[in-house]
Each structure stands twice: as C-alpha cells, then as structure tokens.
Image (spheres, grey):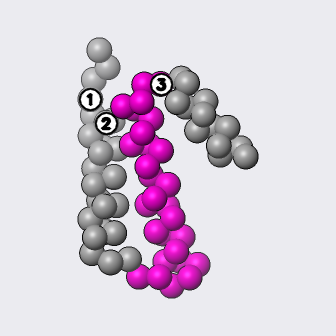
Amino acid sequence: MLGQYCTIRGYRAAPLSVVAPVDNAWLVFAAILGFVAFGEVPGPMTVLGAALIIAGGVALTRVKAR
C-alpha cells in the first residue's frame, strides 16, 4: 500500500512525462528480482526493454526544466 500511495503522490506532484519513466523502472526491478530470487534468465528483448527504460530515465535527468 505504501508503494501505491507514493506512486499516486508522484503523479499528483509532477507532470506525467517525468513520473512515467520512473514508474516504469519497476519492470527493471522485477526482472532483477526474478533473476536473483528465482533464477530466471531474461531474454534479449527483456534486456533491450530494460536498457530503453534506463536510457529514458537517464535522458530525463539530463533535460533542463523550463
């Protein structure tokens, strides 16, 4: 519940273009958890998707606020 509360607060506090890439980071963490806890090996498309999510977050941190 705390995670959902923080997500809702984030959507209220910042524009969607800022919050959405950060919110999508849970997919990366889920893949890491699957690997560590269950031994699931991510496929090439999963790795590519994670790289795109991370790249989006990094690009977002580099953009100057208007």
Residue 10 vs 33, above or below: the answer is above
Label 2, label 3: how far apart the Cα atoms are: 13 Å
**Residue 53 located left or right of residue 7:** left
The quadrant of the image that shows the C terminus is: top left
The residue tagged 2 is 60
Residue 41 vs 45, above or below: the answer is below
Residue situated furthest bottom in the rendering: 39
- The image's mark for residue 63 is 1
* Residue displayed at 44% across by 52% down: 25
* Residue displayed at 27% across by 54% down: 52
- The image's mark for residue 3 is none
Tell me, yes or no, whether the highlighted magenta stretch contains residue 34: yes
Give the image quarter of residue 61.
top left
Residue 50 screen position, x and y as percent: 34, 61
Q: What segment is highlighted magenta in the picture?
A: 14-41
The residue tagged 3 is 14
Q: Amino acid at mark 1?
A: Val
Q: Nearer the viewer, mark 3 or mark 1?
A: 3
Residue 7 screen position, x and y as percent: 58, 38
Question: How many tags in the picture?
Answer: 3
Q: Amino acid at mark 3?
A: Ala
Residue 59 screen position, x and y as percent: 26, 40
Label 3, label 1: how far apart the Cα atoms are: 15 Å
Q: Amino acid at mark 2?
A: Leu
